Amino acid sequence: MIDDAALNSPILQPIVVLMIWTMIMWAWMYATRIPAMSRLKVDPDKMVRDPDASLDRTLPAEVQWKAHNYNHLHEQPTLFYAVALLLAITGYGDGMNALLAWIYTGLRIIHSLVQVTANRVMVRFVLFAISSVVLIALIVHAAMVVFD
């Protein structure tokens, strides 16, 4: 049973914000992808049967950037969700850990905005690298709790 302190842990807020952002990116992806596919008369059934076909080759890059970012939000952030939940249920989801979680979430949102608009690779790389360092700090804090 999870106690009330874990349910009210401040670290849960950036988790929910990043989940909401992921669904915003999902909606943005389909709001651009479906009209582009329709305009270009893309037949999805034909695409899955053609080993050489790909939406990356068919749709404009600007449309695909949203899909790529949506996929990215299901990669490294899964570690974030796990470590943040671990910190919440162990009673360490406040203070510095909550701040780091907000920083991670903010960096991932900024990373998304860069990727789906200008898509400057070096800017994205720096944002990703910094967010990775923040995530590593959260993982180290979790390890200190679990292996204490």
Image: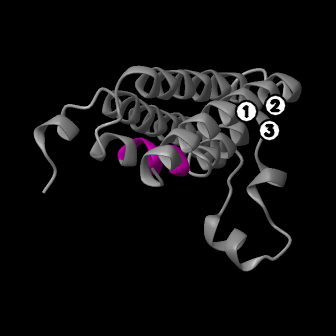
Q: Mark 1 points at which residue?
A: 128
Label 1 and label 3: CA atoms lie apart by 20 Å
Left or right: where does residue 105 sit relative to residue 63?
left
- Dominant secondary structure (helix, strand or loop) of the stretch shown in magenta: helix
Which comes sooner in the sequence, label 1 or label 3?
3
Question: Left of 69 or right of it: where is 19?
Answer: left
Q: Mark 3 points at which residue?
A: 61
Looking at the image, which residue is at 71% across and 22% down?
114
Residue type, numbered disc 1 = Phe
- Cα separation, mark 1 vs mark 2, equals 5 Å
Place residue 8 in its image quadrant.
top left
Give the secondary structure at mark 3: helix
Residue 125 is tagged as 2
Identify the magenta region: 78-85
Q: In which quarter of the image is the N terminus?
A: bottom left
Label 3 and label 2: CA atoms lie apart by: 18 Å
Q: What element carries label 1?
A: helix
Circle on res. 33: none
Q: Where is residue 9 in the image (x, y as percent from the top left)?
A: 26, 31
- 48 vs 88, left or right, is right
Residue 55, x across and y down, in percent: 74, 55
Dot 3 amino acid type: Ala
Mark 1 vs 2: CB contact within 8 A: yes
**Residue placed at 51% from the left, 43% from the top?**
80
Is the residue under label 2 in contact with that under label 3 (CB below 8 Å)?
Answer: no
Q: Are marks 1 and 3 in contact (CB under 8 Å)?
A: no
Residue 21, compared with residue 48, is above or below; it is: above
| Labels 3 and 2: the sequence-earlier one | 3
Considering depth in this image, is 139 or 132 the residue closer to the camera? 139
